[in-house]
Image (tube, rainbow, N blue to C red):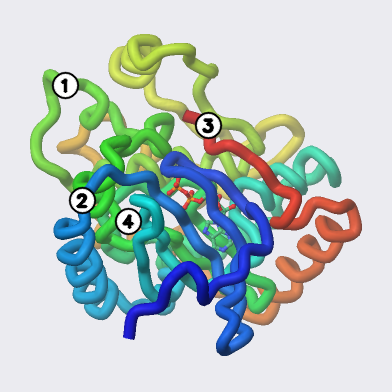
Amino acid sequence: HQFTSDDLEDEGEIGRGAFGAVNKMIFKKLDKVMAVKRIRSTVDEKEQKQLLMDLEVVMKSNECIYIVQFYGALFKEGDCWICMELMDTSLDKFYKYIFEKQHRPLTQSLILRPKITEELKINTSGCKTPANILLHRRGDIKLCDFGFQAKLVDSIAKTKDAGCRPYMAPERIDPERAKGYDVRSDVWSLGITLMEVATGNFPYRKWDSVFEQLCQVVQGEPPRLMTSYNGMEFSKEFVEFVNTCLIKKESDRPKYSRLLEMPFIRRGETSHTDVAVYVADILESMENDGITQFTANQQAES
Ligand code: ADP
């Protein structure tokens, strides 16, 4: 049974990404809260029906505890609304809050937790950025990235990859080298994400144009994490892991199976409870400071 936008009550914007706004909404009949991502589209009614059917199929085959749950989709005035599980915050807001407001790095229990990488390694096509890694006070870390997105966006939005440009691997930016999609490009994005979240800084200078990015990422040296940075210390294993993800030459960069063999991943587990307590604690301070998802208006840097 298809529901419509009349079944939903809008509670306001909670985030913004490359494809548009994400709002908190309530499904009135069941009094259930959800996050609704609205993607601008130009498809006609016939294509909409087909897309909705495709979506259902992809979503069903894509159920995974590391991806936010999908409730359904609808079209409203041409926009595609994607209804999904509401999470508490995104990793980019979370780590920025910790660095900027609390003047401390993300504790190692979260960043060094092998699970985060395990969660990231699941094969969703598309790059992981701190903005589409979502946290819940239960301690869950999930991707807001439904493998279908690339396809959906291709057919709907025509703004492909805009949101993850800065995280894109050299071989994906350089048109000369562009070939088919390879999971190793996602490994690069993971490296950039881990480095940013661990150090509190995006590892490249800000660029003003795609051309400038091309020069830095394609022609420059890849970013390198050091064991100490700005008074913070990182373990040898973590540094080795990040730098391995950031091997510039695609053919030398490992795929997930080899990464999973690395000491950083193989070493010690932090319990789920620790992460839940840590995340809930930071979320509470964020809320006390009035920085909840409902006031957030961060624009994904692109
Ligand atoms: P896009 O794919 O359009 O770039 P994102 O998926 O990155 O958009 O979402 C943009 C922001 O919206 C995220 O950084 C996050 O703050 C918020 N957001 C997205 N999905 C959810 C969700 N399910 N629960 C809570 N917040 C979300």
Position of residue 32 in the picture relative to residue 264 (left or right): right
Kindly indicate the quadrant of the structure image that contains residue 166. Answer: top left
**Structural distance between the alpha carbons of marks 2 and 3:** 30 Å
Q: Nearer the viewer, mark 3 or mark 1?
A: 3
Which one is nearer the viewer's eye here, 294 or 142? 294
Helix, strand or loop for disc 4: helix
Under mark 1, the amino acid is Pro
If the image is split into quadrants, where does the N terminus sit? bottom left
Q: Is residue 42 above or below residue 1?
A: above
Q: What residue lies at 58% left-to-right and 37% top-to-bottom?
A: 299
Say which residue label 2 marks: 44
Which one is nearer the viewer's eye here, 69 or 11? 11
Q: Nearer the viewer, mark 2 or mark 3?
A: 2
Q: Is residue 134 above or below residue 296?
A: below
Sequence order check, earlier mark of 3 and 1:
1
Kindly indicate the quadrant of the structure image that contains residue 270. Answer: bottom right
